[in-house]
Amino acid sequence: MTDQNRSSDPDREKRKIKSAKKMKEIMTEYYIEAKTAEQTGKKVAWITSGGPVEPLIAMDVIPVYPENHGAMIGASKMGVDLCEKAEQMGYSRDLCSYAMADIACAPINGGPIGGLPRPDMLVCCNNICGTVLKWYEVQARYFNVPLFILDTPICHTGFSKEAKEYVKRQLAEYFEFLEENTGRKFDFDRLEEVGKLSLEGQKMWQAVLDTTLNKPSPMSAFDAFIHLALIVTLRGTQSTVDYYKMLLDEMTERVKNGISAVPNERYRLLWDNIPIWFKTRWLSDKFASLDACLVADTYTSSWSGMMTYIDEHNFMDSLAETYTRIYLNIGVDEMAQNVLKMIDKYDVNGVVLHSNRSCKPYSLGQYDTQRIIQEKAGLPTLMIEADIVDERNFSESQIETRIDAFMEVVASR
Amino acid sequence: MITVGIDIGSITAKAAILDERQLKGTFIQGTGYDAKTAAASAFQKVLDVSGYEKQQVDFVVATGYGRKSVAFADKAITEISCHAAGAHFVNAEVRSVIDIGGQDSKAMVISPQGKVLDFAMNDKCAAGTGRFLEVMARALEVDLELLGEISLKSNAPATISSLCTVFAESEVISLIAKGEKRENIVAGIHASIGARVVAMAGRLGLKAPLMMTGGVAKNVGLVRMLEKNIGMPVEISEHAQVLGAIGAALIAQQH
Ligand code: SF4
């Protein structure tokens, strides 16, 4: 099907989410602002997706996310070329393809937006993985800018007082780092305001995600993958809160009018791990053609999972716990418990797990998670071996057979 | 009701015809370059061997990698469900099935009704598949069909440690150069596939009785190796290679 008759397909048109246009505008404006920061005297900081961004917003520093860049590269199918470039630069194919693609982009201003805005500083939090440490060191050397590393110990079980103290002390250093690099005193009052907005944004985002509790669901995880952009990049701002309010209204309206994401939703599925960015359209069409809607996922919900630990009245004090106990920094058992809760909550018929070649922390425990799901929930599961950006790790006909077979199992239950 | 199952694999195309639950005929040929032509020809040939006319056929189910290219089929079902149905047809007691195909190997656990409860497939590469065996047979200059018999003579299987088909092939070549006995190399190759398949199937928790389907089931050496690795007897049907097609024809009977 060509793009042309896609957009003229009235059924597709009806199911299209209208707010998306507004989000595109916000994102474009944001990237323009970041790209022209030098002229406006603003500072740009690159930050990891799980890093504490609120202090940056409070200090008027524009946050830029190399991982979001990675996702864009994947979605625009530029991943293979850039990964190959990184290999030529001497990086191993076993590295995370977000890192490979981003590192390869920097010297050539490559990728879909002609390279990321140049950073004035880098903020790296290892609560998501260890890859980011080396990735940010490479970029700090390349751009010759200061790097701040926030080390968050893994919380296999619980969260100790010592861990909290350890992270809090580093956060204090983080504030100093920002003072040094902006030449301004850290604004603690403003941080509390930003914290409130961040929490509100997360609540709104979760409310949007929860509209999929409706049967049929007004949106799918594939929609969430797109609309996620703001809670990742601009959480802590008013425009994010406003946008999700608008999106929530649209979803509520869709429920009222019986507009579903998938034309004949018969099966509801849960997705685990980061999207296969270069194949989201294909996967979305594939599942829809089998009357299956991916109603929830562990990935997009992790940006609201943080709110559990936020203290609205003392944001700064709760920052340490909030950013240490995020989804990828907890034990496999707790992750599996989370999956079981979601299975129950969203009432799904099966679970699709993306074994993501790039992301070890996300994929490592998946066979255990799979076993736990089968034992505790008795649901069929499907493991798809693929990648977020590097298409060389995707075999369409094999994956199609797995999906078909999985759906035959789901349907026969 | 007359139904036909067509199984288009990456190496061979198979067809089976059923009248209710009576098997009326089967046919096997190479898939060759064009899956469409192979499907049409296997369809015609299975009609010829069973003495039916096209117009008598009520429903056709296609399966296997080329299932979507069989334009005349009424429905496409994956080989996972079809092999399960086929195995259940020849022995209703069977609870687990292993199928080593040309491009991939799969294991499934099935219900007393022959439905797939759970399945696993090898990951993207060719390790542990029929294609792996084919490449090795060529490196050893042995007829694919003879691998099984040859390996039974071995008393000290060689070690093939590479999972990658290309690397394993060079391992085989260097074993040949070192003068390792052919039967030991073949047995080593079977052990390597066996280990792969067991690693995949192990996650499922296979239940006895276990049946192996697909063309590779004709390889006795590999079957013995699997029995040893899995620790349970492996049943083989005389129809092993066409069980996917038979299963497809059976599923067609439900329409
Ligand atoms: S390894 Fe995983 S968490 Fe780390 S950057 Fe890559 S995708 Fe993100």
Image: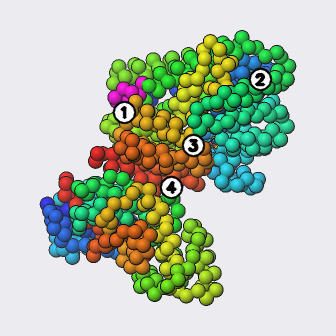
Question: Can I make out residue B244 in this image?
Answer: no
* Disc 2/disc 1 C-alpha distance (Å): 43 Å
Q: Is mark 3 within 8 Å of ligand 1?
A: yes
First in residue order: circle 4 vs circle 1 = 1
Residue positioned 73% across, 53% down in the render: A91
* Disc 3/disc 4 C-alpha distance (Å): 21 Å
User: From the viewer's perspective, is residue B21 above or below residue B49?
Assistant: above
Question: Label 1, on which residue?
Answer: A347
**Residue B180, disc:** none
Same chain assignment for discs 4 and 2? yes
Question: Label 3, on which residue?
Answer: A362
Q: Which tag is nearer the camera, tag 3 or tag 2? A: 2
Label 3: which secondary element: helix
> Quarter containing ligand 1?
top right
**Residue A395, disc:** 4
Q: Position of residue A314 (x, y in %)?
A: 65, 14
Q: Which tag is nearer the camera, tag 3 or tag 4? A: 3
Which residue reaches farthest front?
Answer: A161
User: From the viewer's perspective, is residue B207 above or below residue A219?
Assistant: below
Q: Is mark 4 within 8 Å of ligand 1?
A: no
Is residue B247 shown left or right of residue B202?
Answer: left
Q: Is mark 2 within 8 Å of ligand 1?
A: no
Residue positioned 58% across, 19% down in the render: A199
Q: Quadrant of residue B150?
A: bottom left
